[in-house]
Amino acid sequence: MELAEILGFLGALIIGIVLGLIGGGGSTLTVPILVYVMGISPVIATAYSLFVVGSSALVGAIINAKKRMVDFRMGIVFAIPAFLAVFLTRKYLVPAIPNELFSVGDFLVTKDIAIMVFFAIIMLLASYFMIKKRKDTTTEETTVQYNYPFIIIEGIVVGVLTGIVGAGGGFLIIPALVLFAKLPMKKAVATSLLIIAVKSLIGFLGDVQNTRIDCVFLLTFTGISIVGIFIGLYLNKFIDGKKLKKAFGWFVLIMAIYIILNEAVLS
């Protein structure tokens, strides 16, 4: 096994640990690890990321469902437009993007560069929500509100973004559930994992016909990530998740800046 593979599978373990510790954010590592460490093209990496993120989120959703933390009604309302948007984006929109988009002087903007820069912009947004202090004004006694129009629109937007970059989008889903549905933060995080699992795994199906999948590699990478989730859940008993989330947010910010520089300036 080459050094890049060892580092890549170690990265898969870290992805899972982060998900287990802070309930999200690990997906922002998946694409950079697959692209820069494992040498996989961005389009295939985003497809693989959907499966890795979806499978990992499913494990977290099952664990939370056993604790009765998942609002299934809200999860279904959000997930249906989201997974339809992801599936259609992966099956039709991403393949339709030309390999060469436009030129700026001597610099040619390709499909791969555009996807990575767009992914970096999503990472910048994710880092902002991780670093920013968010006050949870809802309580367990707060009445859940099913604001269907906003939830459906948010689901479509998150679905398209997820389809393009292969990230879970929890940083967009959780605020929507808290603001529009008045879910308590813990239930919003738990419900978001269910939504991420459904839309990511179904979205991945949109790639099956368009992308050559290395099943052995993908299942190995995903399996290691899932092991990491259980390690993260165990470590969560001893580590302050809020402080860790803020620190990870700064790391994601640095990674986003690196990707933009690497793709748009240094390439």
Image (tube, rainbow, N blue to C red):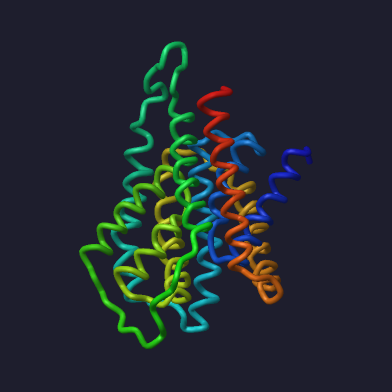
Residue 266 can be seen in this image = yes
Quadrant that contains the N terminus: top right
Q: Nearer the viewer, residue 102 or 91?
A: 102
Seen at 47% across and 57% down, the residue is 129
Q: Is residue 238 left or right of residue 104?
A: right
Q: Is residue 264 left or right of residue 221?
A: left
Q: Residue furthest left?
A: 149
Q: Residue furthest top?
A: 106
Q: Nearer the viewer, residue 256 or 59?
A: 256
Is 57 above or below relative to 219?
Answer: below
Seen at 44% across and 50% down, the residue is 204
Quadrant that contains the C terminus: top right
Residue 208 can be seen in this image = no
Is 214 above or below relative to 12?
Answer: above
Residue 107: x %, y % from top left: 47, 16
Q: Is residue 37 left or right of residue 91?
A: right
Residue 70: x %, y % from top left: 43, 77
Count of numbered marks:
0
Seen at 58% across and 59% down, the residue is 246
Seen at 40% across and 42% down, the residue is 164
Q: Nearer the viewer, residue 262 or 101?
A: 262
Residue 266: x %, y % from top left: 58, 23
Is 209 above or below relative to 148?
Answer: above
Residue 182, quarter of picture:
bottom left
Residue 32, quarter of picture:
top right
Q: Residue furthest bottom?
A: 141
Residue 20: x %, y % from top left: 61, 66
Is 25 above or below relative to 184?
Answer: above
